[in-house]
Image (tube, rainbow, N blue to C red):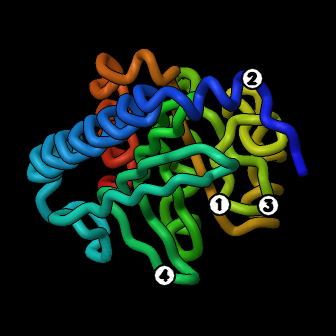
Amino acid sequence: MSKFTTQELDLASDPTVLLIKYRMIEKVWDYLEDMQKEIRKELDSFEDKLPSELNLVHGKISKGENYKYLPYLMLDFPAFFTKKDIIAFRTMFYWGNFISSTFHLQGKFVQKYGKSLLHSLKNYGKVYFCVNNSPWEYDYKSSNYVLLDKMDSVELEDHVQNTGFIKLSIKFPVEEMPERKTDMMNFLLAGLKVIQTN
């Protein structure tokens, strides 16, 4: 039988920790709902210029308790998912790690918008490019994400050819979440402006 550590017993004796966590998760949910409303307002200005597959009315907020042992919440909006084709903007809160926004293109949407999006966002700022063979990892270890401006065009093309997807992401520390909504909205709008013109 494993022995309990003093730290574990102290933590398990204090209900405050989980009560604060519960309140925090509720507030992050509200934060994502507010963001969804703000995105919906911005989408009006794009009228019929975005891919018809995109759901521009309803987003989806999901939450879980165990992405690598830690809680998370995510908003997919605007988004379209099938097994083969994906175009999505995902905002993710990952407990103890970050708040992030990510463009995910896969299948036919890579062919249609991939090069333009990479070119446009290369000089946007600290944008990360997913170098993993799987699109379903979210941490920012060097095996998963590297800064887009550190990659050359050959590396980018090879990765896209080999995996069939593109993920471009920005992230901020959790403690900066209240003031970073505008940055995430601007990232979304920068990407959508590229998509609407192609």
Callout 2 touching callout 3 (CB < 8 Å): no
Provide residue 191's location: percent of width, then percent of height: 40, 44
Between the C-alphas of marks 2 and 3, the distance is 41 Å
Between the C-alphas of marks 3 and 4, the distance is 18 Å
Which amino acid type is shown beneath numbered disc 1? Trp
Between the C-alphas of marks 1 and 3, the distance is 9 Å
Tell us which disc is closer to us: 4 or 2: 2
Which amino acid type is shown beneath numbered disc 2? Thr
Tell us which disc is closer to us: 1 or 3: 1
Mark closest to the chain's N terminus, 2 or 3: 2
Q: Secondary structure at mark 3?
A: loop
Between the C-alphas of marks 1 and 2, the distance is 36 Å
Badge 4 is on which residue?
82
Q: Looking at the image, which residue is at 76% across and 54% down?
A: 157
| Mark 3 neighbour class, 10 Å CA radius: few under 14, some 14 to 19, many 20 or more | some
Q: Residue furthest right?
A: 1
Badge 2 is on which residue?
6
Badge 1 is on which residue?
136
Compared across the picture, whether 150 is left or right of 100 comes to right
Compared across the picture, whether 140 is left or right of 181 comes to right
Callout 1 touching callout 3 (CB < 8 Å): no
Provide residue 74's location: percent of width, then percent of height: 41, 51
Which amino acid type is shown beneath numbered disc 3? Asn
Badge 3 is on which residue?
133
